[in-house]
Image (cartoon, helix red, strand yellow):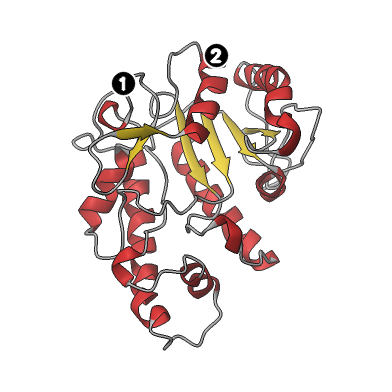
C-alpha cells in the first residue's frame, strides 16, 4: 500500500475539498461552546453532541477515509464515533494535518503488527486495532482476493461525517438525509466505485432500498451508475451482520462482474 501524500489524483482533490468545507464549518466550534450560537442548524447540533467544553478537545469530522480512484467497493457507514483519547485531527489542526491523516488512514504505519486498521491514544506509544474496520475489511478481502482491502481497492466513508457520542444521537431529519445523499453522490461521482456497500438500515435508506435478509445488488434512489448492496451494521443485535455474511459477499461478487446499471432517466 503506497503513501498517498505525494500522489495527486481525483481522490486527493476530493479529500481536500471535503476537508476544506468541513474545516470552514468547524469554525463555529468556539461560538457554539461559549453559548453564543443560537442557531439549531445541523452543524451547531453536531458540534454540541460531542459534549466537549474545551474547543481543543473537539474532534474534526471525517471527510473520507483513504480515498482512491476507481475502487471496487465504497463502504458507507452512518456516522463516525467519538474516541475520547484518540490521536486524531481536532479543532486547531491545519488543513495539511487534517488531509494527511485521512489520506493515509489505512497506510501501513496506521495498522497494527498483524496488519489490521489501528488507532492510537494520547500518551500511549502502543496502537490498538479497530474492530469495526477490521470486520468490514475481512468481509471484503475474501471477495476481492486480497489480504486487506481498505485503502487498496476499497474506500470507507460515512453518510454524516460529524462525530458524536453514541449515547447522544441527535435527531435525524429529512433535510439531514438530503444533505447526506448529496454528499454521497458527490463522493460516488468523483471516485466511480463499482459497488456501494451500506452498513445498517439508516444508511441503506439514504442510498437505496433496504433488502434486509435478502441482500442483492440493487439500484440507488438516484439511478447512480453503481450497484448498491445493503447489509446490517457490524454491531447489529443478534449477530445479523455475521449471519448474512455469505449472502452479502455473494451479492457483492455478483455486482462486481455485472455491467453498471443504466440510468432510467436523465
Write down the residue under mark 2: 142
User: Can residue 200 be seen in this snapshot?
Assistant: yes
Secondary structure beneath dot 2 equals: helix
**Viewer-nearest residue: 51 or 252:** 51
The mark closer to the camera, 1 or 2, is 1
Q: In the image, residue 144 lies at what x, y percent?
A: 52, 15
- State the mark number for residue 200: none
* Image mark count: 2
Say which residue appears at 28% left-offset and 52% top-offset.
Answer: 98
Q: Badge 2: how crowded within 10 Å, few (<14), some, or many (20+)?
A: few
Could you tell whether 246 is left or right of 5 in the image?
Answer: right
Quadrant in which the N terminus appears: top left
User: Can residue 244 be seen in this snapshot?
Assistant: no
The answer to whether 232 is drawn above or below residue 19 in the figure is: above
Q: Quadrant of residue 92?
A: bottom left
Could you tell whether 112 is left or right of 83 in the image?
Answer: left
Q: Badge 1: how crowded within 10 Å, few (<14), some, or many (20+)?
A: few
Q: Quadrant of residue 42?
A: bottom right
Secondary structure beneath dot 1 equals: loop
Say which residue appears at 72% left-offset and 48% top-offset.
Answer: 205
Q: In the image, residue 132 lies at what x, y percent?
A: 52, 35
Write down the residue under mark 1: 113
Say which residue appears at 75% left-offset and 26% top-offset.
Answer: 216
Could you tell whether 221 is left or right of 194 in the image?
Answer: right
The answer to whether 218 is drawn above or below residue 178 in the figure is: above
| Alpha carbons under labels 1 and 2: distance apart | 20 Å
Q: In the image, residue 117 lies at what x, y percent?
A: 39, 30
Q: In the image, residue 249 lies at what x, y percent?
A: 65, 19
Of the numbered discs 1 and 2, the one sitting upstream in the chain is 1
Amino acid at each position: 500500500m503506497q503513501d498517498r501524500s505525494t500522489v495527486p489524483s481525483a481522490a486527493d482533490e476530493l479529500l481536500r475539498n471535503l476537508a476544506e468545507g468541513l474545516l470552514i464549518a468547524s469554525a463555529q466550534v468556539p461560538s457554539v461552546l461559549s453559548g453564543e450560537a443560537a442557531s439549531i442548524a445541523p452543524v451547531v447540533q453536531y458540534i454540541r453532541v460531542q459534549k466537549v467544553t474545551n474547543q481543543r478537545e473537539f474532534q474534526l469530522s471525517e471527510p473520507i477515509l483513504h480515498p482512491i480512484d476507481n475502487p471496487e467497493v465504497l463502504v458507507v457507514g452512518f456516522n463516525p464515533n467519538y474516541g475520547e483519547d484518540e490521536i486524531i485531527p481536532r479543532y486547531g489542526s491545519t488543513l495539511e494535518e487534517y488531509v494527511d491523516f485521512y489520506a493515509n488512514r489505512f497506510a501501513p504505519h496506521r495498522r497494527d503488527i498483524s496488519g489490521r486498521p489501528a488507532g492510537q491514544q494520547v500518551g500511549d506509544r502502543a496502537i490498538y486495532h479497530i474492530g469495526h474496520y477490521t470486520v468490514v475489511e475481512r468481509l471484503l478481502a475474501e471477495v476481492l482476493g486480497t489480504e486487506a482491502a481498505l485503502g487498496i481497492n476499497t474506500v470507507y466513508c460515512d453518510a454524516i461525517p460529524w462525530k458524536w457520542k453514541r449515547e447522544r444521537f441527535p435527531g435525524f431529519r429529512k433535510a439531514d438525509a438530503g444533505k447526506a445523499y448529496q454528499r454521497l453522490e458527490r463522493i460516488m461521482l468523483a471516485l466511480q466505485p463499482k459497488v456501494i456497500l451500506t452498513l445498517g438500515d439508516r444508511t441503506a435508506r439514504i442510498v437505496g432500498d433496504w433488502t434486509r435478509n435478502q441482500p442483492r445488488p440493487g439500484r440507488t434512489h438516484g439511478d447512480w451508475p453503481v450497484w448498491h448492496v445493503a447489509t446490517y451494521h457490524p454491531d447489529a443485535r443478534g449477530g445479523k451482520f455475521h449471519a448474512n455474511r455469505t449472502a452479502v459477499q455473494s451479492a457483492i461478487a455478483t455486482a462486481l462482474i455485472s455491467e453498471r446499471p443504466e440510468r432510467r432517466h436523465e
